[in-house]
Image (cartoon, grey):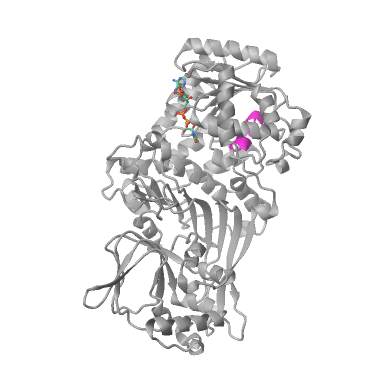
Amino acid sequence: MMNNQSREDASQDFLAAMNMGATSPDPCVMVVFGASGDLTKRLLIPSLFNLYCDNLLPDSFAILGMAMDDFTSESFRLKMSADLHKYSRREHFDEIAWADFCDSIHYLKGRFDDDDAFRQLKSFLQALDGRYDTEGNALFYMATPPSVFGMISTGLEGVGLNHSDDGWRRIIVEKPFGSDLASARKLNREILTYWREDQVYRIDHYLGKETVQNLLAFRFANGMFEPLWNRTHIDHIQITATEQVGVEWRGGYYDQSGVIRDMVQNHLFQMMAYLCMEPPTSFEAEAIRNEKFKLLSAVRIMKHEEVRHMAVRGQYDEGVLPDGSPAKAYRDEHAVDAHSNTETYAAVKLRIDNWRWHGVPIFLRSGKALRTKSTEIVVQFRRAPEFTFRGTPASGQLEANQLIFRIQPNEGIEIRFLAKRPGPSMHMRKVNMNFEYDEAFITHPGTGYETMLYDCMHGDPSLFSRSDLVETAWRIVQPILDVWGAEKARDFPNYPFGSWGPKAAFNLPAPDHRRWLARTPQQALERVPMFEGSGKMMLHAFAMMLKPAVFNAGDEIARLGDEGRELFIIEMGSVDIIDQEGDVVTTLGDGQVFGELSLLVTKKRRASVRAVSYCALYIMEKRDFCKVLMDRPQFAGRLMQTARERYNVIVDAQEWMASDDLD
Ligand code: NDP
């Protein structure tokens, strides 16, 4: 269906690598229920067009959109064309290819509770099958609200479209698959009454992302990690998925959902399963899905009384957008209840009761309206024993190794480890090795849907959820949903738009002396005047030392008279510096630093510091600061100069670096 010139002109070979050796799927008609909706225009049609341009659609292929809106095929094509020009991420939009592709799009108006509409659908499908020679194969995509999934599956059965003697019949069911364990079971029952499990493709397009799939490649194609992948060597795991945006136009949907249902139960659990499951015996769909199921089944189900200690919820307040303009509180968003109890942030601590992971906590967190958009996994290894370095400066400097998977943005893998600092004595410092996907491969701007659609047309369900997997995932979050549903959060809203999330989330790993990995610390350092001109390498070295902390308005951050051993960088918020008389000496805000003097001289603090508002701070401990500084005597000299000018404190850089205090 695509002319040769168009194929050649499809310049953005986003799937070029995958395209090599990829076979064209079976001919088919794809019926999109809910074709006038948001998903269809923003993700489905752009993804199908991407596949088309990369020659990954069958030659015999047609799309039939169905919804309640009053379109003809012609007017629907015009709408799709306008939408695609808006939403396609292709760098070079190929108009000829689009015109070709567009010809294969059709539309049928109909309600999903109307039997007659399904009879019309059947006739339309037969006509398209004849015209496009699609061999009786049909893929039904439910791009609709979940409330009508059951209705559509039943409607299709009513006219016998759930089976065919000639070709295959498959349905793709969008997420969310249910809203709790009971509704997921009910939906499974409804669908599986008329469809076989192998016909049902429950989609979570997150799994179509290359970097998520790369978790499998990393774990099972690299022999060196598997022996370390267990409780003997791994201390804990962190999985974080944050968004900068609020609920935008989806308040109506989101207010019924919340982040546990929207992100944790599906995306985060999928990543956890890939990361923690046993090696499958093959790459066959069932082998992988069996291992995922076993892993999720081993997650300890929280008792209701444990939810308070193992899970933290948050809801965003008004704040600031990245461009500095004001942002609404969640409760003021369109279609959100003004007293909503829905969580827009969650942090959860899970335990996996199997031999491999016993005693290794898994920390998950996700939220909207946060400072950065990022998805990342941190595998923290156990610290090496220190006895070898007894009697050397290195004892006390040992830190745990970390393996970091950056899923998005800047997809890559990083390993942080210790190295000896050059020089006669045995000093250690944290360094890293970094792998960036887009330096090694031509990466593509795909949505994740391309892979999922391609696999489904091929009949490969590896990346799709099975009924038992979905139900098991719901079973894990059900106690959290029960407790949070029954107990209204008293502190909502509890984090500002554009912040790091609620303070309590930062305390979740803390009882075990664990911490979330700091996000974007390098940018924070760049804003600090003291670090001006430090150079990329040094900033990078400092950035790896920073630890994040959150304080609420009124919290005491540092106390007068305490021995100060750390520097604080204000990422956001403001603090009062209060002298011994209790007077506010000054107020500091974003990008400013306090406590730097305590890095230079061991003295009791001469002032207290109190949070005026919600504060996100980076903490740099003296010993970490010094480790980096030792390698940069010039910067140390400059720092001493600053100390002299700003605080009238004279410190000898050489003496200071040699002091026992730093070891
Ligand atoms: P929309 O509300 O934008 O679209 C729903 C579509 O279904 C509309 O075309 C609507 O028609 C149609 N529809 C609903 N009920 C009926 C009915 N009884 N008879 C006929 N047509 C009906 O939803 P989205 O496109 O945003 O989402 C669709 C699904 O995809 C949801 O399950 C969502 O969770 C999931 N999803 C969405 C994402 C997104 O970015 N939008 C991302 C990931 C998943 P009409 O316009 O006439 O009402």
- The spot of residue 627 in percent (x, y) is 52, 77
The prevailing secondary structure element of the residues shown in magenta is helix
For the magenta stretch, what is the residue range? 449-463
- The spot of residue 277 in percent (x, y) is 56, 48
Nearer to me, 186 or 111: 111
Is residue 165 something that shows in the picture? no
**Image: 467 above or below 630:** above
Residue at 46% in and 13% down: 114
Q: Is residue 376 left or right of residue 251?
A: right
The image quarter containing residue 564 is bottom left
- The spot of residue 55 in percent (x, y) is 72, 33
Nearer to me, 405 or 286: 405
**Image: 564 above or below 267:** below
Q: Is residue 457 left or right of residue 313?
A: right
Tally of numbered discs: 0
Name the quarter where the N terminus is drawn: top right
Q: Is residue 8 left or right of residue 537?
A: right
Give yes or no for residue 374 being in the magenta stretch.
Answer: no
- The spot of residue 644 in percent (x, y) is 42, 85
Residue at 38% in and 75% down: 595
Residue at 54% in and 84% down: 392
